[in-house]
Amino acid sequence: MFIITVLLCFGYTLCKDLAACDSQIYCDGPLLHAIQMAKIFPDGKTFVDMSMKENPDVIISAFNNLTNQSRTTLKNFVSQYFTGPGEELETWAPTDYVKLPLFLNDIKDPQLKDFGWDLCRIWKDLGRKVKDDVKLNPDRYSMIYLPNPFIVPGGRFRETFYWDSYWVIKGLLVCEMNTTVKGMMENFVHYVKTRSQPPFFIPMMYEYYKTTGDLEFIRSNLDILEAEYQFWMKNRTVAVERNGKMHILNQYQSDVSKPRPESYFEDVKTAQQRDIADTPKLYSNLVSACESGWDFSSRWFSRENGENLTLNTIVTMDIIPVDLNSILCLNEFILMTFARIIGNSTKEQYYHQKLTNRQEAIEAVLYNTDAGIWHDFSLHTNKSREYFYMSNIFPVYMECTDLTNEKKEKLLQYLQTNKITEYISKGGVPTSLDDTGQQWDFPNGWSPLQQIMIWSLESIPQTKQLARKLASSWLDSNFLGWQRTRGMFEKYNVLEPGTRGGGGEYDIQEGFGWTNGVALEILKKYGDVLTTPESNPQSTCINGCVIRKSNILIVLLAYIVYSN
């Protein structure tokens, strides 16, 4: 069994090298190389999302018998033997959809109430389930069979992704769709394959537990949660010495040394800009960056000896990331908490020690006392990488640091010095300050990172007002985009509120799962104080505000019925 484009796994010792999986069509080999290098589709993900009309051996034999491999011949070959993409899925309407979730009661602004109502409704548009044929004929698909329906991000992302689902699930819980969430969690338990993404499975379970109190579900899956954690501790660790003490931290470090199937052409072209001897390591660094979810960003580029901030300088595996270690810190806290609730004092003590060790390591290796912030660490130079990235704030959000008054003041000063406070009042905080054309760089803003920044600032007395400002400016941007287009975007341009972000390997996507989830979280937390921005006279609202006003009327009428 193989998997390319679904649930980029939370890892286990059972995970296999992507290029070594048993598909000669979707994962590696001459057929994949020929089709992807011919650029039959503008987006390489299209081919690996297609399903087969015949069994793999028939298709491979037909490919080997081709008299030539011209683009036209390959295009006809694909048309003859493949179908889709997306035909392995069918639309699914969540059965637990709630027309009027309670959080709407606390939203004062009528237009934001309408916005929140529509965000919950959008989940119905993003519901999918895997067709039974995938279970019956697994070798014909790149997607594995999942037993329960799920919510997809949207656009080209026709499957459920690992760290996206954390914010999707948080949004679903706001909309009181607990059954859908439980089904998605069971899918993650069911799934054990290929490369990883940031380890949010345990935090997902924690969010579900805090909302439902379903301890039995946690108890029955605790061994899976621990296996998730142990994958990272057995396969993604590095030791760093500081002040005579060794600290164990984690990094993204994939063993895969071949092009990504879904971005095969792009990876080969990037490798051609490097010495051929460096090619396997380059591919590993590219895949490792994908593990981070930040694919791609100047955050992973070398920056040494005057090198340009370009993808061929990527050195992901030389870097210890602040965010990954903060997430694992939260994982350790949650596992400690679950062990205590279940009554296993031995495991509680074990994870308490792991948590303590992690906190000490983050402070010793990643905290930059002079800058007053946490930075990624370079193993090559043995120094902090002193650049602004939204990941710098993660230890605060994950509660992995003892925030003294001095640290709080320094953090505020850091934000002011780097002019982040100016962006907070505009269209959101950029992912970085480097304008490289990569999607995880300036001027793009991503909803998950905005939420982490907002919640972090909210937890510090000196920055509470900044948190409210950012919540307002980011929601304004989401609202304006929705008002004009009826769409929610994967990323936004922080310089132009309400507009799509850009850059990266594919066109901007609409939907959009985690954007919706974060907007719902902001509305739930700040809905009693936030208001909509003034109407934009340049708005090109499709079908105008008639739809919006009618939705408000529907919501208000429904409230009357509901309250009676």
Image: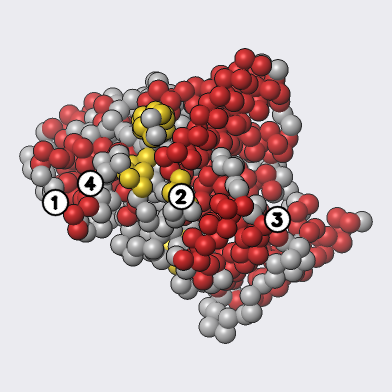
Q: Percent from the top left, x then y, of residue 520? A: 65, 55
Reading the image, the residue beneath label 4 is 267
Cα separation, mark 2 vs mark 1, equals 38 Å
Reading the image, the residue beneath label 2 is 369
Q: Earlier in the sequence, mark 3 or mark 4?
A: 4
Tell whether 550 sits left or right of 505: right
Callout 4: SS: helix
Q: Which of labels 3 and 4 is toward the front?
A: 3
Count of residue discs: 4
Q: Earlier in the sequence, mark 3 or mark 2?
A: 2
Callout 1: SS: loop
Q: Earlier in the sequence, mark 1 or mark 3?
A: 1
Q: Earlier in the sequence, mark 4 or mark 2?
A: 4
Q: Count residues near mark 3 (Cα–Cα under 10 Å), then give few for <14, some for 14-19, many for 20+.
A: some
Cα separation, mark 4 vs mark 2, equals 38 Å
- Identify the mark at residue 516; answer none if there is no mark: none
Reading the image, the residue beneath label 1 is 273
Cα separation, mark 4 vs mark 1, equals 10 Å
Depicted 319 relative to depicted 424: above or below? above
Reading the image, the residue beneath label 3 is 525
Q: Percent from the top left, x then y, of residue 493? A: 45, 67
